[in-house]
Amino acid sequence: MSRDINPFGLRMPEDLRQLLEKSAQLNHRSMNAELVMRLRKSVEEDPVFMPQVSEEGGEYSTDENQLLSDLIAKMPKKKRKALLKFIKSM
């Protein structure tokens, strides 16, 4: 990680800090690397940050298919069924 990145203070509950510390140890990472990896993953998986899918093109790229697949896989079963029902009704 670059040295030109400014430090960022973070307050968190002690129990959460202990869980993250244990996870960092199990993953052979520093606490900072563990936090950065987890934050990056949560941002990349957030639908708000997903690229816009063009309706005009008709086909989706492999990346778009993977993003949609990952998003659907993370949905609760009830919501996934409702989405499939909606799609079939179109």
Image (tube, rainbow, N blue to C red):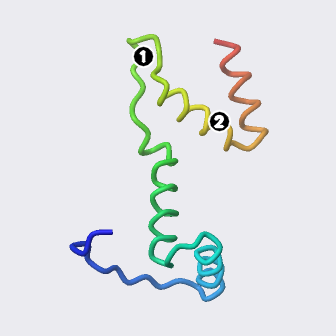
CA separation, marks 2 and 1? 19 Å
Residue type, label 1: Glu
Residue 75 percent across, percent down from the top left? 68, 42
Residue type, label 2: Ile
| Circle 1 SS class | loop
| Circle 2 SS class | helix
Return the residue found at the far bottom: 14
Quadrant that contains the C terminus? top right
The residue identified by callout 1 is: 55
The residue sitting at 56% across, 32% down in the picture is 68
Q: Which mark is residue 34?
A: none
Neighbour class for label 2 at 10 Å: few (<14), some, many (≥20)? some
Q: Which mark is residue 72?
A: 2
The residue sitting at 57% across, 73% down in the picture is 28
Neighbour class for label 1 at 10 Å: few (<14), some, many (≥20)? few
Residue 47 percent across, percent down from the top left? 49, 43
Residue 24 found in image quarter? bottom right
Residue 4 percent across, percent down from the top left? 21, 73
- Of 81 and 33, the residue lying toward us: 33
